[in-house]
Amino acid sequence: MITPRQCKAARALLGWTQAELAEKTDLTMDTVSRFEQGKSDTRGQAMIKMEAAIRQAGIKLLNPENGEGEGLRFASAKR
């Protein structure tokens, strides 16, 4: 599951604004902003949409629960 910090970092890596992420996910910019500030539920459909858009853009989210630490990177190219 994506964290607010990962969401913000992924946008920066992709060069996306909050408005661009909102547009790509059919969410409002306020929803994206509130999520990144930790002011909204992190288990809802909005979070799932943001995570899907970021993954589709080629970002791999690292899972802090399995020892990778909280972070992200570009996904490896498929061979």
Image (cartoon, rainbow, N blue to C red):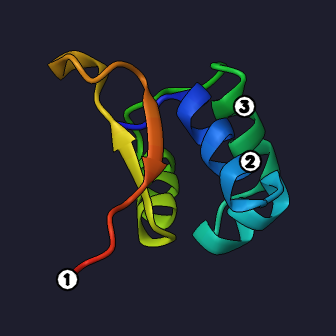
Work out whether residue 64 or residue 43 is closer to the camera in this orientation and state it. Answer: 64
Q: Please, what is the three-letter code of the amino acid marked with disc 3?
A: Arg
Residue 44's spot in the image, x, y percent? 41, 41
Spatial CA span between label 2 and label 3: 17 Å
- According to the picture, the residue beneath numbered tag 3 turns out to be 34
Q: Earlier in the sequence, mark 1 or mark 3?
A: 3
Q: In which quadrant of the rendered view does residue 32 lie? A: top right
N-term mark: 2 or 1: 2
Amino acid under label 1? Arg
62 in relation to 54, above or below: above
At label 2, the amino acid type is Ala
Where disc 2 sits, the SS reads helix
The local crowd at label 1, few if under 14, some if 14 to 19, many if 20 or more residues have their Cα within 10 Å, is few
Residue at label 2? 12
> Mark 2 or 3 closer to N-term?
2
What label sits on residue 51 in the rendered view? none
Q: Determine whether label 1 and label 3 are within 8 Å by CB.
A: no
Position of residue 76 measured from the top left corner of the image (x, y, whole percent): 32, 64
Q: Quadrant of the N terminus?
A: top left
Q: Is residue 37 left or right of residue 46?
A: right
